Amino acid sequence: MALQKRIAKNRDKLFTFLDYDGVPWNNNNAEHAVRAFTRLRNAIGTSTPKGHREYATLLSIQQTLRYRGMSFLEFMRSGGLEIGD
């Protein structure tokens, strides 16, 4: 019952990725992101909304680069602001 309430409360945020073209129906990146947040929370014990946003941004960049076969470290070192095709 608690899970059902949580899903109903946050339903607008849970499936945001569905609003973007090009995301396949069987995309499991969202599941991987949730696992990453869980590992972060377990490692630091607490977190803030700002910290979650910053972590989500970095995680999104990292996942996009991985999907495109590019190095996260090399991209960050490049100082680039756009991920090229």
Image: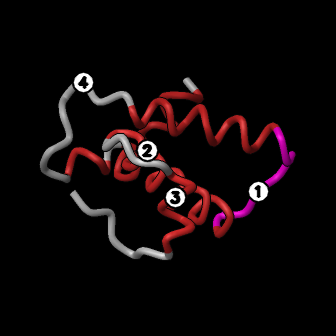
Q: Nearer the viewer, mark 4 or mark 2?
A: 2
Q: Amino acid at mark 3?
A: Glu
Left or right for 75, reference 43: left
SS at mark 2? helix
Disc ID at residue 63: 2
| Spatial separation of the CA atoms under disc 4 and disc 2 | 16 Å
Where does the magenta region start and end?
43-49
SS category of the residue bearing label 4:
loop
Whichever of labels 2 and 1 marks the residue nearer the N terminus, that label is 1
Magenta stretch encompasses residue 46: yes
Is the Cβ of the residue at disc 3 closer than 8 Å to that at disc 1? no
- Pick whichever of labels 3 and 1 is earlier in the sequence: 1
Q: CA distance from mark 2 to mark 1?
A: 21 Å
- Judged by depth in the image, the label closer to the viewer, 4 or 3, is 3
Q: CA distance from mark 4 to mark 1?
A: 30 Å
Position of the C terminus, as image quadrant, is bottom left
What amino acid type is highlighted by mark number 1? Ser
CB under 8 Å between discs 4 and 3: no
**Mark seen at residue 47:** 1
Question: Real-space Cα distance between discs 2 and 3?
Answer: 14 Å
State the residue position of label 3.
Answer: 74
